Amino acid sequence: MVKIIDIHCHLTFKEYDADREQVIKDAKAVLKGVVSSGVEPDDSKHALKLAAMHEGFIFVTFGLHPIHVAGKTDQEIGKYEEFISENKRKIVGIGEIGLDYHWVRDPLKIKRTKEVFVEFLGLAKEFDLPVVLHLRGTGSEAIEEGLRIVSNEDIRKAVFHCFTGKPQLADMICEEGYYISLPASIVRSKSMKKVAKRIPISLLLTETDAPYLSPDDEERNVPQHVKVVYEEIARQRKIEMRAAEEEIEHNFERFFGVELR
């Protein structure tokens, strides 16, 4: 039986401290694999330990979320980059990295965020790893700028995680050969549903961003809620659920360069 995949969540976050192993056990009953994204050094170390405990099911990406950039010195970032280099064979990607104009508004902090973003794209190229992009802001400015940057930096493999942009912008991303990942909050978004329907299925991935963006606004999100994304993709494209599962599994393996068991 083909199972579903959550390409982006945060199993290390405090929201799971009380029942993390149960959450993972429940996810294993429904999912074939999850990718837990490290957002800063300590979080990445925790994610690596978690993946070692659940080898072949939990995969890890290392990044520096834009909201954490300003709080780190050049020395701290350099030390983190060394840690990433030492563990490059244990991770499947660099991310999440990018721009956040919702939380980061100070011009000097924005400038530094962009510099660190480009620096981490350099790591991805050096280690030949795909990139998981966090691009958030009012309107589409952050997404458009992020697209320009990854294209200018000659990044071959990137996924626009938790894509919230307009369908026309999704078309531009796919024309560059980049992937788009849709979250479980698709149930509340007409725009995401349109994206699910129109972009090439070969460039589509699925995620929860758990513990955030639950399909039910009132509750904590968990990886198995990614099922609603598959259901919506199947509905919008008028295909069988199994066909959606198979396509996205191929996309996952091709993008991250791993084979699921």
Image: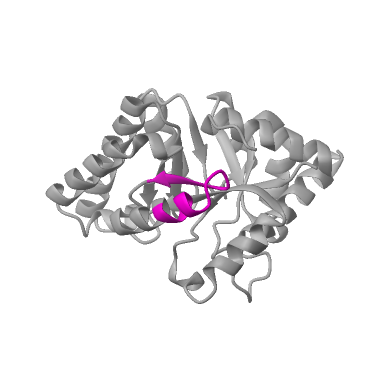
Q: Which residues are magenta?
A: 49-62
Residue at image position (53%, 24%) is 176
The percent coordinates of residue 54 (x first, y second) are 53, 52
**Vertical relation: 244 (above or below) 175:** below
Is residue 207 found left or right of 15 in the rendered image?
right
Residue at image position (59%, 71%) is 220
Residue at image position (60%, 32%) is 259
**Any part of residue 23 in sight:** yes
The residue positioned farthest toward the left in the image shown:
75
The percent coordinates of residue 237 (x first, y second) are 81, 39
Q: Indicate how the structure is coloured in the image.
A: one colour
The residue closer to the viewer here, 165 or 39, is 39
- Using the rendered view, name the quadrant where residue 130 is placed: top left
The residue closer to the viewer here, 87 or 129, is 87
**Any part of residue 172 in sight:** no
Residue at image position (41%, 26%) is 155
Quadrant, the C terminus: top right
- Using the rendered view, name the quadrant where residue 122 is placed: top left
The percent coordinates of residue 248 (x first, y second) are 69, 37
**Vertical relation: 128 (above or below) 227:** above
The residue closer to the viewer here, 150 or 157, is 157
The percent coordinates of residue 108 (x first, y second) are 19, 52
Is residue 32 found left or right of 117 in the rendered image?
right
